[in-house]
Amino acid sequence: MGEKRLGSKAEKLLALLLLILLAWAVAATSAASFLYIENGSLRRELEAREKLLGNLVLVNVGIDYGNGTVTWYNNTPLPRGGATPLSALVAVATVEYKVSGMGAYVTSVNGVEEKILSKNEGYSWLWYILDREKGQLVLGPVAADRYKLASGDVVLWRYEHWRF
């Protein structure tokens, strides 16, 4: 007696559309809530990384073994205050070096040692820095522990034959 039934196709279609609209609203709200929470989490992670990177420089370090083998270590993180070509090499390789009043002198990289054939000839480790203006590598102007690196610098250590 007072009961109403959805009898017409139009009423059934309207009820179905309302049900679909309700399901869409719940799904959209859930997705928006998830994305809001995820965004906050990613923002906190990015802020932590930026704080950490504020104390670091990122440099690209290459090692050329003189036999055709060149290995690159891109975006190598180094402490901002102590980033030098020597510290960059030490961060990516096993290194032996000597220190004198003139600075550090690398004698071995990953077991490849300098070879002095005579007082006028030998094989040694030399470092190069990318000159951004010239677009080419230039021989390091000072000892490897005396040159300060900045983010984006490119350093190449090369095992080279030399002769006077």
Image (cartoon, rainbow, N blue to C red):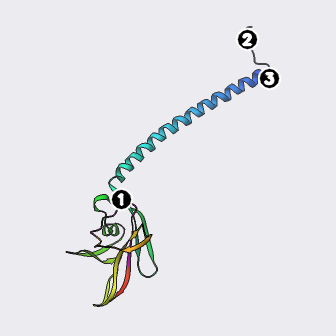
Q: Position of residue 83 (x, y in %)?
A: 31, 63
Q: Residues within 10 Å of mark 2 (few under 14, many from 20)?
A: few
3 vs 1, front mark: 1
Q: Who comes first in sequence, dot 2 or dot 3? A: 2
Which region shows up in magenta? 145-158
Q: Which mark is residue 3?
A: 2
2 vs 1, front mark: 1
Q: Which residue is mark 3?
A: 9
Report whether 27 appears left or right of 157.
Answer: right
- SS assignment at label 3: helix
Q: Amino acid at mark 1?
A: Val
Q: Position of residue 149 (x, y in %)?
A: 33, 64
- Tell me how far mark 3 sits from mark 1, CA to CA: 69 Å
Q: Who comes first in sequence, dot 3 or dot 1? A: 3
- Tell me how far mark 2 sits from mark 3, CA to CA: 18 Å
Q: Which image quadrant for residue 43?
A: top left
**Is 44 one of the magenta-colored residues?**
no
Q: Residues within 10 Å of mark 3 (few under 14, many from 20)?
A: few
What is the quadrant of the C terminus in the image? bottom left
- Tell me how far mark 2 sits from mark 1, CA to CA: 76 Å
Q: Is residue 87 above or below residue 10?
A: below
Q: Which residue is mark 1?
A: 57
**Is 147 one of the magenta-colored residues?**
yes
Report whether 7 appears left or right of 43.
Answer: right
Q: Amino acid at mark 2?
A: Glu
Report whether 29 appears left or right of 64.
Answer: right
